[in-house]
Amino acid sequence: MAGLFESAGGGGAAIALDEVEASILRSLEVQMLELIGPGPGGDGDDPLAALFAEGPSEAPADPALARLFPDAYGDPSTPADEEIRAASGEFRRYTELDLRARKRDDALQVVRALDGLGGAGVLKLAAADCLHWLGALNDLRLTLGVRLEVSEEDEQGLYELPDGDERKPLVMAYLWLGALQESLLEAITD
């Protein structure tokens, strides 16, 4: 997959995507939306109720969600003293819903932009849209990294997987998302 971001001036960026690239990216973002889940109260959120809604006080059991919504104080897999655990729960209770909403919004921005592309073509992003895309690409990459159990020490090994390895398609997506993220960052800082 060769489509990478280039500067479009003014903090914006552009990328040429073929149908396969656009379809893969859209599919991954839709899966991200499913993983993150709906907002409090589902699709028909009452804005006033959402204002007073409280989030969960426990870390998600799914490792990918735990990576997207980490504990503020310490690693949840190690025993922490009760005071730290309580502070982490309080922080999560008041911040996770907003963080989920932002991640959902980032993913939706990408899906809508790809839907507007109509399959293949050059997608031009304004500066504000680039920030949503950076967030969405980062979330996808973090999620795939957790699912693939990638660590800094073994990332090089991803390039050496045999073609028959069942993880190969996810690894290819993980590496491609990293290249997209890097090229977008370079494009908006030019």
Image (cartoon, helix red, strand yellow):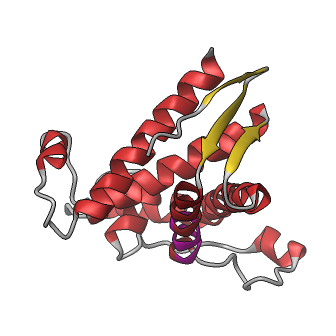
**Front-lying residue, 180 or 128:** 180
Q: Quadrant of the C terminus?
A: top right
* In the image, residue 31 lies in the stretch drawn in magenta: yes
In percent of width and height, residue 143 lies at 39, 60
Q: Is 44 situated left or right of 167 in this image? A: right
- Which residue: 57% across, 64% down? 23
Reply above or below: 166 against 19. Answer: below
Answer with the quarter of the image where residue 60 lies.
bottom left
In percent of width and height, residue 125 lies at 75, 38
Q: Is 157 situated left or right of 114 in this image? A: left
In percent of width and height, residue 181 lies at 50, 38
- Which residue: 21% across, 59% down? 149
Answer with the quarter of the image where residue 120 lies.
bottom right
* In the image, residue 89 lies in the stretch drawn in magenta: no
- Which residue: 74% across, 63% down? 115
In percent of width and height, residue 112 lies at 75, 61
**Front-lying residue, 154 or 68:** 154
- Which residue: 61% across, 64% down? 100
Q: Is residue 70 visible?
A: no
Q: Which residues are magenta?
A: 28-34
The dominant secondary structure in magenta is helix
Reply above or below: 26 against 124. Answer: below
Q: Is 62 situated left or right of 153 in this image? A: right
